[in-house]
Image (cartoon, rainbow, N blue to C red):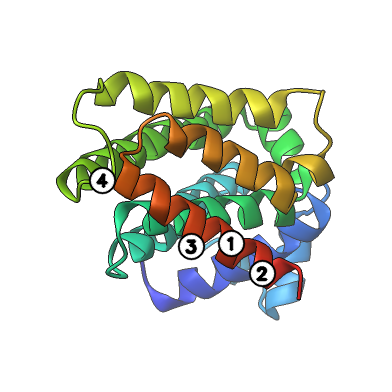
């Protein structure tokens, strides 16, 4: 992806996150970028193509952010906290209108994001489970594939469940409970010690 297209997609991202997708026209994008529509059409064929490139870029951004958690030299439980904090922040900053517009008006692009998100979470959790077992933080006698699918299912159902408001779902209280629920079911005694330390650190940081 060339730098010009990257800059276009960064501006499009700002507009879509702030206003949603449907209300933003190609004229709006060109105006915000300070270019003509003719120039804009050198990079995309139409709005559907622009939305598709926006979606591809979002998937890439999320993959890179999560991969940074894996490259930071943390143990499996510390890594899980970092990944979960990133996902929590992403949901908190998301404009519901953007997801709604994508799902209603561009379902083919929405399905791509959902597929990438599901496959990504599953693979990340599976890698985390394997790492935790190797480090002696997670039990060896578990079915890693089933646990990864359970994690994904629980994350999806909690997000979509009307029992929780967006504020509740992204609260530190629920965040800690979900991680505790997940880790305690798979952790060794050593792992539980790391979990309790991380929870204390998190609670201290948020209570300052």
Nearer-the-camera pick, 142 or 124: 142
In the rendering, which numbered label is found on residue 43? 3
Residue 181, horizontal then vertical, whole percent: 54, 33
Mark with earlier residue (2, 4): 4
Single out the mark in the foreground, 3 or 1. 1
Q: Which of marks 3 and 2 is nearer the N terminus?
A: 3
Q: Nearer the viewer, mark 2 or mark 4?
A: 2
Q: Which of marks 4 and 1 is in front?
A: 1
Residue at image coords 67%, 73%: 36
Q: Distance between the residues labelled 2 and 4?
A: 25 Å
Could you tell me how far apart the alpha carbons at marks 3 and 2 are, in whole angstroms?
48 Å
Quickly name the residue at label 2. 204
Q: Residue at x 57, y 32 (%)?
A: 110
First in residue order: circle 3 vs circle 1: 3
Q: N-terminal of the two: label 4 or label 1? A: 4
Q: Mark 3 or mark 4: name the one nearer the start of the chain.
A: 3
Q: Where is residue 201 in the image (x, y as percent from the top left)?
A: 57, 67
| Mark 3 crowdedness (10 Å alpha carbons): few <14, some 14-19, many ≥20 | some
> In the drawing, does residue 152 fall left or right of residue 131?
right
Q: According to the image, label 1 marks what residue?
A: 200
- The residue wearing badge 4 is 132
> In the rendered structure, are the residues bearing label 1 and label 2 in contact, judged by CB atoms less than 8 Å apart?
yes
In which quadrant is the C terminus drawn?
Answer: bottom right
Q: Quadrant of the N terminus?
A: bottom left
Give whichever of 64, 192 is nearer the camera: 192
- Callout 4: few (<14), some (14-19), or many (20+) C-alpha neighbours within 10 Å? many
Element type where label 4 sits in the image: helix
Residue 158 to residue 87: above or below: above
Q: Which residue is drawn at 64% across and 46% down?
A: 175
Q: How far apart are marks 1 and 2 (CA)?
A: 6 Å
Asked whether residue 59 appears in the rendered view, the answer is yes
Image location (x, y in percent) of residue 12: 65, 62
């Amino acid at each position: 992806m060339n730098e010009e297209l990257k800059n276009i997609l960064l501006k499009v991202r700002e507009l879509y996150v702030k206003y949603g997708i449907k209300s933003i026209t190609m004229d709006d994008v060109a105006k915000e970028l300070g270019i003509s529509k003719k120039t804009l059409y050198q990079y995309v064929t139409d709005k559907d193509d622009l939305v598709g490139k926006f979606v591809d870029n979002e998937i890439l951004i999320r993959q890179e952010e999560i991969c940074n958690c894996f490259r930071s030299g943390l143990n499996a439980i510390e890594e899980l906290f970092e990944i979960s904090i990133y996902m929590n922040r992403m949901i908190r900053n998301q404009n519901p209108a953007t997801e709604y517009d994508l799902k209603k008006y561009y379902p083919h692009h929405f399905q791509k994001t959902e597929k990438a998100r599901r496959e990504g979470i599953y693979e990340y959790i599976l890698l985390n489970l394997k790492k935790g077992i190797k480090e002696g933080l997670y039990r060896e006698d578990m079915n890693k594939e089933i646990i990864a699918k359970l994690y994904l299912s629980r994350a999806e159902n909690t997000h979509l469940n009307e029992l929780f408001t967006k504020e509740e779902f992204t609260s530190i209280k629920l965040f800690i409970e979900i991680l505790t629920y997940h880790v305690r079911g798979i952790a060794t005694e050593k792992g539980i010690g790391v979990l309790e330390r991380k929870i204390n650190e998190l609670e201290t940081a948020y209570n300052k």
